[in-house]
Image (cartoon, helix red, strand yellow):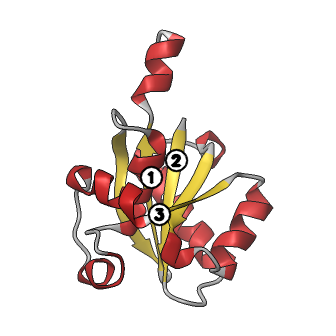
Amino acid sequence: MIVAGLGCRKGTSAESILSALEAACAAAGISRESVTALATGEIKRHEAGIIELAGKLGLPLHVLDDAMLKQAEGRTKTVSQHSLAQTATPSLSEAAALALAGEEAELIAPRLIADGATCALARSKELFMKDGA
């Protein structure tokens, strides 16, 4: 499973968030179609651009509570002062991706910023071990 963790400025369009997702996929050397789920924090639950993007891509959107984000924060790689002030996690997008992908997940693309949105990608190691890959 590959999870895209998303964050954005309030009112960011789905197209801008898609730009961040596509840039993260390019950085990781994967196709956008490889992403199996989207994740964000409770603070972005009603963000129209994120909701619209999930619908357009036909991907499930998981909204994670602060406790789940906090558990993943030790595995994040970047620090956003804005994210720390708003969510108490160094990177909402990284923490969301890692939390949903599982305890053994690894970042394959750290937080990337594009057009007012952030995206980080995490790959679940558990799924690959189960599949034998």
**Residue 28 image position (x, y, % from top left):** 42, 46
Residue at position x 61%, y 48% in the image: 37
| Residue 65 numbered tag | 3
Q: Farthest residue in the front direction?
A: 67
Q: Earlier in the sequence, mark 3 or mark 1?
A: 3
Residue receiving disc 1: 97
Which of pointers 3 and 2 lies earlier in the amino acid sequence?
2
Say if 101 sits above or below 97 in the image: above
Q: Nearer the viewer, mark 3 or mark 2?
A: 3
**Label at residue 76:** none
Report the residue at 69% width, 80% height from top.
Answer: 48
The x and y percentages for residue 47 are 62, 80
Q: Which residue is mark 2?
A: 3
Question: Residue at horizontal 48%, vertical 72%?
Answer: 7
Q: Secondary structure at mark 3?
A: loop
Ranked by sequence position, the earlier of labels 2 and 1 is 2
Please provide percent x and percent y for residue 18. Answer: 61, 67
When the figure is inspected, residue 37 is found, relative to residue 18, above or below; the finding is above
Q: Are marks 2 and 1 in contact (CB under 8 Å)?
A: yes
